[in-house]
Image (cartoon, helix red, strand yellow):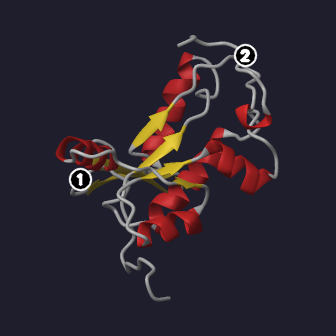
């Protein structure tokens, strides 16, 4: 299709510029190191530091919406938790989206866009306590997230699009 980003080689997902793949073959674990030019986080930081203008982050919810905005010239993208929950599950954003579903969607969006377009991911409330937040950040970074937003809400969270008030957090 005209206008769509195509690349015959698969993209690597850099983690500190190196990604360790674990290949399992007959119970044998073989680590492999892949070198990447620049991580998504480095790309986003470079854009923010070099631009004197606001970086617009169009909201995406799947690989197709990511490709459409990438082809339209977006510098960066925002993967919306509300958008994913609505399109994938047909429900409001009230905490039903799992980390596994968010990670899979992040990976598909990352693979569908050019490497120079960073994706900021809505990390919801971090999917639990401190250990869960740490795990969520690591998994989303490995899936290609350049940055992750974490909401300061108590669980169960409230969907602001439904006119519900925040159930906790810090007032500003």
The one of 68 and 109 positioned closer to us in this rendering = 68
Which residue is pictured at 58% across the width and 69% down the height?
64
The percent coordinates of residue 84 (x first, y second) are 67, 51
Q: Is residue 9 left or right of residue 171?
A: left
The answer to whether residue 11 shows anywhere in this view is: yes
Q: Nearer the viewer, residue 159 or 6?
A: 159
Q: Is disc 1 placed on a helix, strand or loop?
A: loop
Residue at the image point whose x is 73% and y is 37% from the top:
161
Residue at point 36% right, 75% down? 9
Q: Is residue 11 above or below residue 164?
A: below
Classify 10 Å Cα crowding around label 1: few (below 14), some (14-19), many (20 and above): some
Q: Which tag is nearer the camera, tag 2 or tag 1?
A: 2
Q: Is residue 133 above or below residue 139?
A: above
Is 166 placed above or below 24 here? above
- Labels 2 and 1 touching (C-beta < 8 A): no
Q: Residue furthest bottom?
A: 1
The tag on residue 38 is 1
Q: Residue at x 54, y 20 (%)?
A: 131
- In the picture, measured across the screen, residue 88 lies left or right of residue 19, that is right
Residue to which mark 2 is pinned? 167
In x, y percent, where is residue 24? 50, 55
Expressed as whole percent of the image width and height from the top left, the position of residue 55 reads 35, 48
What number is the disc on residue 10?
A: none
N-term mark: 2 or 1? 1
| Residue 122 sits in quarter | top right
- Quote the CA–CA distance across marks 2 and 1: 39 Å
- Does dot 2 land on a helix, a strand or a loop? loop
Query: How many C-alpha atoms fall within 10 Å of the one at disc 2: few (<14), some, or many (≥20)?
Result: few
């Amino acid at each position: 299709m005209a206008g769509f980003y195509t690349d015959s080689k698969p993209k690597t997902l850099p983690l500190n510029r190196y990604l360790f793949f674990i290949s399992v073959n007959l119970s044998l674990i073989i680590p492999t190191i892949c070198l990447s030019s620049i991580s998504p986080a480095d790309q986003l930081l470079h854009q923010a530091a070099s631009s004197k203008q606001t970086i617009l982050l169009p909201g995406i919810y799947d690989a197709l919406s990511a490709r459409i905005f990438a082809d339209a010239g977006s510098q960066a993208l925002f993967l919306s938790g509300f958008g994913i929950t609505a399109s994938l599950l047909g429900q409001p954003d009230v905490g039903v989206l799992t980390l596994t579903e968010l990670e899979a969607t992040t990976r598909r969006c990352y693979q569908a866009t050019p490497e120079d377009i960073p994706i900021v991911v809505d990390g919801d409330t971090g999917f639990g306590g401190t250990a869960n937040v740490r795990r969520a950040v690591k998994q989303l970074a490995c899936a290609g997230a350049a940055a992750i937003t974490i909401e300061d809400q108590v669980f169960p969270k409230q969907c602001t699009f439904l006119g519900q008030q925040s159930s906790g957090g810090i007032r500003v």
